[in-house]
Image: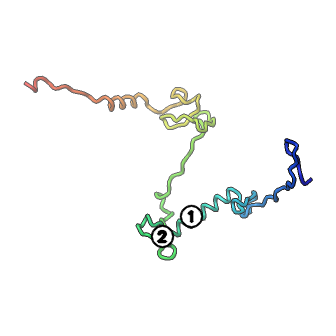
Amino acid sequence: MDSYTDNNGMSCGGWHPAEPPRLCSRGCGFFGSEENRGFCSKCYRDYLKETMAKSEAGVIKSAQLGIDKPIDVSSSAKITEIDSDNPSVSAPPVVIKSRCGLCRKKVGLLGFECRCGGTFCGRHRYPEAHPCSFDFKSAGKIAIERENPVCKGDKIRDKV
């Protein structure tokens, strides 16, 4: 069966199946492609990150130093790394809240942030529907004081 017919009934000769897919070059178990140098999509992305990190560590751009030619760091000088033992350097992990604080229902992208700091679903988004610890009354008083400063008029006695 070297040929097949398309929907119009015309014969398209010489159709041969493509070569069988190859496994990823790193041996992760997924199939690689020639476009990705034999890697699967995940391993190719990691490969690109590694090559970018090597090229950035090896060459300092001339714009940073104001020199016409790029300097090869590996041959001329060594860059001192920041101590990894110092906890103030590392950033705290970002926590994504994707569940309601009361019923634990998944809220996804549509979670409602309350002023008390919690994320809630559509049913529990109002302060009356969950145990809200935010004091709206005092926050309102502070906002009114900030927006409406006290205006005192001049006394007539001082002008006479």
Q: Quadrant of residue 150?
A: top left
Q: Which residue is mark 1?
A: 53
Outermost residue, front side = 10
x and y percentages locating residue 89 in the rendered image: 47, 58
x and y percentages locating residue 2 in the rendered image: 90, 54
Q: Where, quadrant-wise, is the C terminus in this rendering? A: top left
- The amino acid type of the residue labelled 2 equals Pro
Q: Quadrant of residue 123?
A: top right
Q: Image height check: is 33 above or below 125? A: below
- Element class at badge 1: helix
- The amino acid type of the residue labelled 1 equals Ala
Q: Residue at x 56, y 34 (%)?
A: 120
Q: Image height check: is 17 above or below 156? A: below
| Residue nearest the viewer, comparing 136 with 53 | 53
Outermost residue, left side = 160
Alpha carbons under labels 2 and 1: distance apart: 16 Å
Q: Residue at x 53, y 37 (%)?
A: 118
Q: Residue at x 85, y 56 (%)?
A: 16
x and y percentages locating residue 55 in the rendered image: 55, 67
Outermost residue, bottom side = 75
Name the side, left or right, on which 132 lies relative to 39: left
Between label 2 and label 1, give the one nearer the viewer.
2
Name the side, left or right, on which 100 lies relative to 19: left
Q: Quadrant of residue 51?
A: bottom right
Q: Which residue is mark 2?
A: 70
x and y percentages locating residue 78 in the rendered image: 48, 73
